[in-house]
Image (tube, grey):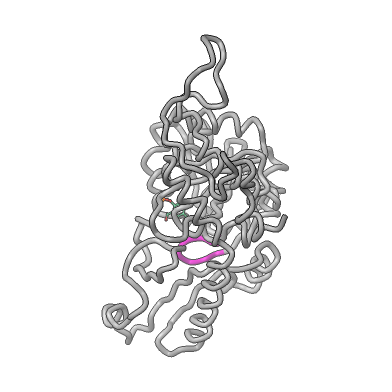
Amino acid sequence: MKIDSLIVKGIDAKDNPNHAVVPPIFLATTYVQDDLHGFQSFAYARGGNPTRTNLENLFSKIEQANYSYAFASGMAAVSAVFSLFQSGDKILLNNNVYGGTYRYASNLFKDRGIAYELVHDFNELKAEDLDDDVAALYLETPSNPLLRVADIRRLAAIAHERGKLLIVDNTFLTAYYQNPLALGADIVLYSATKYLSGHADVIAGLVATNREEIAQKLKFLQNTLGGILNPTDSYALIRGIKTLSVRLDRQEENTNKIITFFSGHPGIEHLYYPGSYSQEEKEIQERQSSGHGSVISIRLASDYDQDQFVAALSLFDLAVSLGGVESLICPAGNDDA
Ligand SMILES: Cc1ncc(COP(=O)(O)O)c(C=O)c1O
């Protein structure tokens, strides 16, 4: 099934109780055991909840993954993934990685004996640059806020040649446009708060992998750290995902009009969108993604007043975050979303 069908039909109504068209929300925190020795599929709901499982199974189909885990926020997903590493490990991150992820690395890695290095341009990284202590490459492509693009397939190849993991934060495109696992990444993760939820009303995170040993650890971490997605938000995310393709199609169409309007406009000193940085990045973007999404960044010309510009917008609200149906604008360097 193609992804635009999967997002709607990925959960088969015939598998729902009473063949309900949408899966019910299971609120129970615990499930009755058959006897002293036998648990059913679900026991205590931190470990597993049918609504969350529905979402995780749907997400596995969308990402072409064998295993998926839903978390209480994108940062809870990032934290679980970072918990896979231990003292002595080093992680390479984009130099303009999402601010919250950088906040984690710069504040919490040291106490755990984990090192990190910021990579200016992942496209220049070679296999021989990967020292023995590097455990993983952590990549956002496109990155936030400069929309820099890196070659997932090439990075997966060099990472694997040297026995390292490639982790991709795919928040800015989703599997509708780009599938990191199919391109060779070991782990894909999301702030599902953004496009996947799509309506600015759910905070959520998702992680998927095809590697069983990583999946087992993630399952353990999900249950042990406890930052699980609750049943109502799992349901809301299933509902949001159903319109992912139509939302992204329209959002990208609108964004293309804005890109055309801004290109060469005297008020815009610099316009950034995925592939705008260089011909090389444009080619990578077109090769590995079927679309560029709806996030762009601008630098206003020096004789344009930022406050006046923002105040004059009628359709854009001044607020952090992205990926919802509302149009938002926020100053670069705001680490909160
Ligand atoms: C690329 C990226 N990753 C992760 C996160 C963290 O997600 P959340 O806000 O859902 O915790 C964000 C939030 O903006 C993000 O933009």
Residue 73 in the image: x percent, y percent? 42, 46
Q: Nearer the viewer, residue 23 or 37?
A: 23
Picture layout, residue 287 above or below residue 266: above
Residue at position x 49%, y 81% in the image? 258
Picture layout, residue 192 above or below residue 305: above
Residue 274 lies left or right of residue 108; in this view the side is right
The question of residue 82 being in magenta is answered with no
Q: Residue furthest top?
A: 36
* Res. 141 image quadrant: bottom right
Residue 182 lies left or right of residue 58; in this view the side is right
Q: How many marks?
A: 0
Residue 304 lies left or right of residue 234; in this view the side is left
Residue at position x 70%, y 52% in the image? 183
Residue 98 in the image: x percent, y percent? 44, 55
The question of residue 142 being in magenta is answered with yes
* Res. 30 image quadrant: top left
Q: Nearer the viewer, residue 161 or 288?
A: 288
* Res. 227 image quadrant: top left
> Which contiguous range is marked in magenta?
141-148
Residue 20 in the image: x percent, y percent? 56, 46
Let me know if residue 191 appears in the view.
no
Specify the principal SS of the magenta part: loop
Let me know if residue 5 appears in the view.
yes
Picture layout, residue 201 above or below residue 311: above
Residue at position x 34%, y 68% in the image? 331
Q: Which quadrant is the C terminus positioned in?
A: bottom left
Residue 101 in the image: x percent, y percent? 43, 48
